[in-house]
Amino acid sequence: MPDHLHILIEPSLLKADGVKPSAKRKKRTSKQNSCLADGFIPSAIEYIMHDIKGKSAMDIRRRFNISDKIWQKSFWDFPIYSDKVFEQKLSYIHNNPVRAGLVQNIEDYPWSSFNHNL
């Protein structure tokens, strides 16, 4: 999509006593704190998105010699708890370029994972 992206990420759970966050990653979300009570913390989606946005923004700025802001600060996440919901979200993502009028057929969108998920 020209102005946003959809991505499915499966973060893992790590034992809390085996994790030592780096200095820049000491802040915990309420979601992480609730997992700590069970002895686990998630490899937080916030950190994953921070890394994806940071690296891609640096690459884009360098490649196109720009200094503009690339990403908005926030992002929207939606927890997926079943195979049915996963399939619904994947279908939504794959059909998004068709709904937006960018292509006639899903398989024609060059940045889609559709052709890799057959």
Image (cartoon, helix red, strand yellow):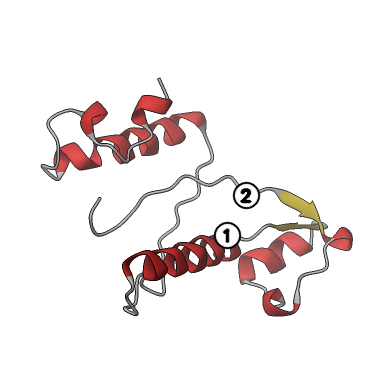
Secondary structure category for the residue under label 2:
loop
Asked which quadrant contains residue 67, the reply is bottom left
Q: Position of residue 12 (x, y in %)?
A: 68, 48
Residue topped by disc 2: 11
Q: Residue at x 68, y 74 (%)?
A: 25
Q: Which quadrant does the C terminus fall into?
A: top left
- Residue 84 left/right relative to 19: left
- The residue under the point 77% across, 63% down is 36
The three-letter amino acid code for the residue at tag 1 is: Ile
In this rendering, is residue 84 above or below 81? above
Q: Position of residue 32 (x, y in %)?
A: 67, 65
Cβ atoms under marks 1 and 2 closer than 8 Å: yes
Disc on res. 8: none
Residue occupying image coordinates x 70% and y 68%: 33
Dot 2: few (<14), some (14–19), or many (≥20) neighbours within 10 Å? few
Amino acid type for the residue under numbered disc 2:
Pro
The numbered mark at residue 48 is 1
Q: Nearer the viewer, mark 1 or mark 2?
A: 1
Q: Residue 76: x, y in percent? A: 40, 61
| Horizontal side of residue 15 vs 12, given as left or right | right
Mark 1 falls on what kind of element? Answer: helix
Decide if residue 21 is on the left or right side of residue 1: right
Give the mark nearer the N terminus: 1 vs 2.
Answer: 2
Q: Is residue 89 above or below residue 77?
A: above
Examine the image and state in which quarter residue 64 appears: bottom left
Which x, y percent locates residue 105?
Answer: 17, 28
Mark 1: few, some, or many residues within 10 Å (few <14, many ≥20)? few
